[in-house]
Image (spheres, grey):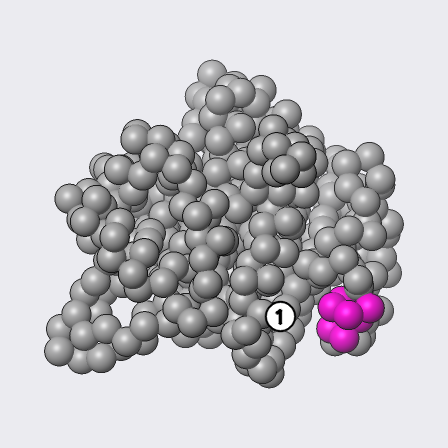
């Protein structure tokens, strides 16, 4: 039922919309005043008939009115009613109260308090919070990435996706494999009319013995002096309070000079108490600070195409290096894992073959 509701509106897409959208002059078309429920690229925003409302089109990039109208007719027959935030979370069974391993206590879901706190924070503080699709857009039969389970191996994964006036996209993923592995991952992509870093959160636990945590304002520009440094002053006082979160990232998967700031919270630890005593309050403060920066930022609408392109570069870099791809492949199969990484987690990304072709032109 959830897949039918969630994927219907993109049933007729035959290409990734963002590959078209990034080539369009989006700066003049990010918002539109509408007077009735109308098609938007992912899920239609419900607007009270007869009352004007400013709608932000929910997509991986935003299209002008003419282009939107051209493809609207193809999607109308597959469009579905929007789900409320509560409905989308409820259909996924979130928040979970017990692990897939029924022999474990409730506290086996180590990072569920982070999920619940973030959901409540979003509902209370974001403007016009709404759900957007968790489906791929690359075939006539879109894959819904909201839930996947391997009961034989004892693992499940759930994902939800949202947008607000402040953020183009906020995705949340929770992976539960009992004591073997617990993961909470979330990425907040700012509305591209704001030249701000991406908020990235990645929290992992392995065998209740080894823990890894990353929380960062991830700069999207090559020159960190022009992008990260102006914001790091807000993070340094927070980081200074938590010695356990001042680690350095390994270069095995990522180059910490690309898309990572100097004030990144990074920790490898074996003392589980660090999660509640240090990581949880630091995570909350970073999330609150990111939204505060959003409220203080001045719109730079003329830079929207460039900012979207840099968000795309971030997605491509991350998709090609994500160390979790191997885990997803082992649990859910290579085809699903590849689609999940490239078409959901980092949906603006280009696969390596696409990147090579683009570079050679």
**Would you call the spot at circle 1 few (<14 residues within 10 Å), some (14-19), or many (20 or more)?**
many
Q: Is residue 226 magenta?
A: yes
Q: Which residue is mark 1?
A: 195
Instruction: Answer with the quarter of the image where residue 360 lies.
Output: top right
Q: Residue at x 58, y 33 (%)?
A: 354
Q: Is residue 118 above or below residue 320?
A: below
Q: Residue furthest front?
A: 361
- Left or right: residue 357 versus residue 150 is right
Question: Which residues are drawn in magenta?
Answer: 225-232
- Left or right: residue 336 versus residue 76 is right
Foreground pick, 221 / 2: 221
Q: Give x and y (percent) for residue 330.
A: 58, 20
- Left or right: residue 337 versus residue 53 is right
What SS does tag 1 mark? loop
Quarter holding the N terminus is top left
User: What kind of secondary structure does the magenta stretch mostly adopt?
Assistant: helix
Foreground pick, 198 / 57: 57
Q: Residue at x 57, y 38 (%)?
A: 350
Q: Give x and y (percent) for residue 196.
A: 63, 68
Quarter holding the C terminus is top right
């Amino acid at each position: 039922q959830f897949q039918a509701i969630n994927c219907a509106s993109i049933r007729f897409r035959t290409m990734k919309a963002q590959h078209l959208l990034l080539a369009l002059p989006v700066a003049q078309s990010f918002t539109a005043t509408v007077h009735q429920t109308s098609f938007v690229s992912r899920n239609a925003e419900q607007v009270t008939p007869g009352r004007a409302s400013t709608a932000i089109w929910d997509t991986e990039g935003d299209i002008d009115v003419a282009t939107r109208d051209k493809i609207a007719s193809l999607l109308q027959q597959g469009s579905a009613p929007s789900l409320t935030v509560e409905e989308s979370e409820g259909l996924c069974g979130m928040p979970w109260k017990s692990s897939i391993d029924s022999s474990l206590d409730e506290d086996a879901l180590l990072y569920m308090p982070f999920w619940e706190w973030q959901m409540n924070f979003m509902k209370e503080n974001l403007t016009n919070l709404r759900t957007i699709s968790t489906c791929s857009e690359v075939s006539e039969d879109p894959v819904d990435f909201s839930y996947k389970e391997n009961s034989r191996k004892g693992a499940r994964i759930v994902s939800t996706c949202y947008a607000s006036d402040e953020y183009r996209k906020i995705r949340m993923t929770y992976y539960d494999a009992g004591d073997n592995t617990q993961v909470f991952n979330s990425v907040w992509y700012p509305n591209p009319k704001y030249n701000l870093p991406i908020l990235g959160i990645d929290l992992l636990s392995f065998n209740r013995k080894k823990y890894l945590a990353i929380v960062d304002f991830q700069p999207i520009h090559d020159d960190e002096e022009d992008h990260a440094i102006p914001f790091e002053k807000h993070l340094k006082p927070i980081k200074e309070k938590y010695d356990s979160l001042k680690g350095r990232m390994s270069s095995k998967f990522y180059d910490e000079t690309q898309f990572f700031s100097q004030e990144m919270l990074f920790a490898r630890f074996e003392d589980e108490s660090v999660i509640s005593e240090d990581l949880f309050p630091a995570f909350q403060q970073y999330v609150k600070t990111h939204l505060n920066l959003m409220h203080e930022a001045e719109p730079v609408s003329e830079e929207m195409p460039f900012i979207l392109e840099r968000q795309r570069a971030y997605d491509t870099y991350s998709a090609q290096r994500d160390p979790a791809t191997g885990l997803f492949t082992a649990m859910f199969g290579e085809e699903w894992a590849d689609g999940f990484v490239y078409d959901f987690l980092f949906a603006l990304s280009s696969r390596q073959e696409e990147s090579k072709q683009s570079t050679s032109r």
